[in-house]
Amino acid sequence: EALARGEVVLAANEGSWTDYLPPEFLLPIAKYEHPLPRNPYHAGLGPVVDTEKAVDKLHTIIDNLDDWKARARERALEVRERFSAESVKNILLNACDRIGI
């Protein structure tokens, strides 16, 4: 939601974020951990970003905030178009057609 509003968003360089964010908004992964260790419904590992590189990225963003805000606003236009209700409907209908539903 923040991305669709044109806010600067950073995320781990793995998972669904890579569908939405350009490479410069993604953070390298340092390791994998159980995000909810005693939760019976989440048994897998999740990525943990490299904290030092995340801090470095934040410094870069703060030092060039206007540029990063412009990048985020530009990306927001793409995300809103690509993931609008109409676009998602078409994606789902095409997937249903491919599997014969």
Image (spheres, helix red, strand yellow):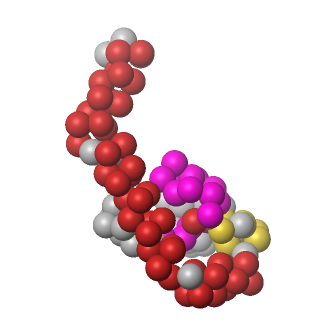
Q: Where is residue 55 in the image (x, y as percent from the top left)?
A: 66, 85
On screen, residue 13 above or below 86: below
Using the image as rendered, state which of residue 46 and residue 78 is in the foreground: 78
Q: Which residue lies furthest to the left in this view?
A: 86
* Res 84 seen here: yes
Q: In which quarter of the image is the C terminus?
A: top left
Q: Residue furthest top?
A: 100
Q: Residue at x 47, y 79 (%)?
A: 66
Q: Residue at x 76, y 69 (%)?
A: 31
Q: In which quarter of the image is residue 99?
A: top left
Indicate yes or no whether the magenta region holds residue 53.
no
Q: Where is residue 80 in the image (x, y as percent from the top left)?
A: 31, 51
Q: Residue at x 44, y 74 (%)?
A: 69
On screen, residue 8 above or below 91: below
Q: Is residue 40 left or right of residue 56?
A: left
Q: In which quarter of the image is residue 42?
A: bottom right
Q: Position of residue 81 (x, y in %)?
A: 32, 45
Indicate yes or no whether the magenta region holds residue 15.
yes
Using the image as rendered, state which of residue 19 and residue 34 is in the foreground: 19
* Res 46 seen here: no
Q: Residue at x 51, y 73 (%)?
A: 68
Q: Where is residue 83 in the image (x, y as percent from the top left)?
A: 33, 45
Q: Is residue 77 left or right of residue 32?
A: left
User: In the rendered picture of this protein, how many numbered marks are placed on residues?
Assistant: 0
On screen, residue 101 above or below 81: above
Q: Is residue 80 left or right of residue 48?
A: left
Using the image as rendered, state which of residue 6 and residue 47 is in the foreground: 6
Q: What stretch is highlighted in magenta?
A: 9-24
Q: In which quarter of the image is the N terminus?
A: bottom left
